[in-house]
Image (tube, coloured by chain):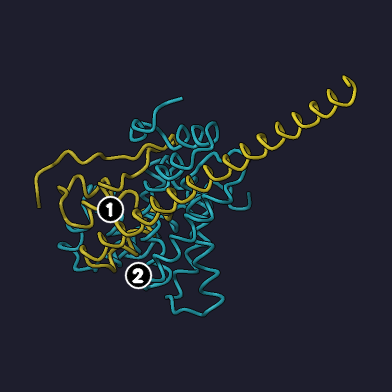
Chain colours: A cyan, B yellow
């Protein structure tokens, strides 16, 4: 059993295992503290209010500390993200807080995150053809970001897009490229 | 933009791709990373997931407000852990009390039997 002082050197899985072995909540606390900023950010994105976002993070902390499932959790961060997002969406549904429409729509796409890394492996030829089929702004953002390795700041300087536009063009462009490439491979029905 | 620094690039989860550390995320939001380091963080934003959502949300907060919120939440978490630890100690005391009571009852039973059958 590692000592608690070493927690910064341990992986999420090791911290979780140490908690399960010892039932000492401090292990779980050390693990949760790694994700405070990310959880707060997710709360802010959906709830648009820092007090509500903080309350939502506290709720997720409490739920994790008191009702962590006994079974294995292969990806703690993913589990925590789903817990936080679902809680925020429930609050939005219950109290009809004003969140932009995209916030809820985007949730449907995020389940595909694991596959996202794979689409880049398609041939450059297919990619070049697919790039011609997406809209100009998305193509420009994708080319600057992936091919020229520009940061968002540099893309903003070159194109005049806003930060959110750059982010959205890259995300939507990737999604569209993936759909086009999948169609080319004849696997869209899978 | 500042020169490259010693902020750890990744977190410590054992997934297929290492996580984005909180230090690096906050450094990114505060504009303390080089363009190359920014690009590395932004590769996370190109995927739709926790980091991407979190950056959208954290960008809506001022640096000081963000930092206060994070500190407040971490402080609350530590307090909560302290309370839970105390509760666990109290539960242990309860078990000790029960064991002591059982011992007393056992002793009383033995004494009763000794008195009854010895006399």
- Give me the C-alpha separation between circle 2 and circle 1: 35 Å
Label 2: few (<14), some (14–19) or many (≥20) C-alpha neighbours in 10 Å: many
In x, y percent, where is residue A173?
38, 59
Mark 2 falls on what kind of element? Answer: helix
User: Which residue is most to the top?
Assistant: B118
- Please report contact status of discs 2 and 1: CB closer than 8 Å, yes or no: no
Mark 1 falls on what kind of element? Answer: helix
Q: Work out whether residue A126 or residue A84 is closer to the camera in this orientation and state it.
A: A84
- Residue A143's disc number: 1
Can you say whether A147 is above or below A15 in the image? below
Q: Give the letter of the chain under mark 2.
A: A
Q: Please tell me in which quadrant of the rendered image residue A69 appears.
A: top right
In x, y percent, where is residue A20?
55, 35
Q: Is residue B110 left or right of residue B6?
A: right
Q: Nearer the viewer, mark 2 or mark 1?
A: 2
The answer to whether residue A180 of the structure is visible from this angle is no
The answer to whether residue A98 of the structure is visible from this angle is yes
- Residue B18's disc number: none
In x, y percent, where is residue A121?
42, 39
In x, y percent, where is residue A138?
33, 62
Q: Work out whether residue B86 or residue B102 is closer to the camera in this orientation and state it.
A: B102
Q: Work out whether residue A15 or residue A144 is closer to the camera in this orientation and state it.
A: A15
Residue at 34% x, 32% y is A5
Can you say whether B103 is above or below A145 in the image? above
User: Which residue is most to the front?
Assistant: B119
In the rendered picture of this protein, how many numbered marks are placed on residues?
2
- Residue A50's disc number: 2
Label 1: few (<14), some (14–19) or many (≥20) C-alpha neighbours in 10 Å: some
Could you tell which of marks 2 and 1 lies nearer the N-terminus? 2
Can you say whether A190 is above or below A17 in the image? below
Q: Give the letter of the chain under mark 1.
A: A
Residue at 56% x, 51% y is A66
């Amino acid at each position: 059993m590692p000592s608690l002082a070493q927690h910064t050197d341990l992986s999420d899985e090791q911290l979780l295992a140490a908690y399960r072995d010892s039932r000492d909540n401090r292990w779980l606390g050390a693990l949760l503290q790694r994700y405070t900023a990310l959880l707060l950010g997710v709360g802010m994105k959906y709830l648009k209010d820092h007090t509500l976002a903080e309350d939502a993070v506290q709720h997720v902390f409490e739920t994790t500390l008191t009702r962590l499932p006994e079974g294995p959790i292969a990806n703690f961060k993913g589990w925590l993200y789903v817990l936080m997002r679902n809680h925020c969406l429930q609050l939005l549904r219950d109290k009809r807080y004003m969140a932009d429409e995209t916030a809820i729509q985007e949730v449907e796409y995020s389940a595909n995150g694991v596959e996202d890394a794979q689409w880049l492996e398609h041939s450059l030829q297919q990619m070049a053809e697919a790039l011609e089929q997406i809209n100009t702004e998305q193509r420009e953002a994708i080319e600057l970001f992936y091919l020229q390795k520009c940061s968002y700041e540099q893309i903003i300087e070159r194109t005049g897009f806003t930060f959110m536009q750059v982010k959205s063009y890259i995300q939507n462009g990737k999604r569209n490229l993936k759909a086009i490439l999948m169609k080319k491979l004849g696997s869209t029905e899978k | 933009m500042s020169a490259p620094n010693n902020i750890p690039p990744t977190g410590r989860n054992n997934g297929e791709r290492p996580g984005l550390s909180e230090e690096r995320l906050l450094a990114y939001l505060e504009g303390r990373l080089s363009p190359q380091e920014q690009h590395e963080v932004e590769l996370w934003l190109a995927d739709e997931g926790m980091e991407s959502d979190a950056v959208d949300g954290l960008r809506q907060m001022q640096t000081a407000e963000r930092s206060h919120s994070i500190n407040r939440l971490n402080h609350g978490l530590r307090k909560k852990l302290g309370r839970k630890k105390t509760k666990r100690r109290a539960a242990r005391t309860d078990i000790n009390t029960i064991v002591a009571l059982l011992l007393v009852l056992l002793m009383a039973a033995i004494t009763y039997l000794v008195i009854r059958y010895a006399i």
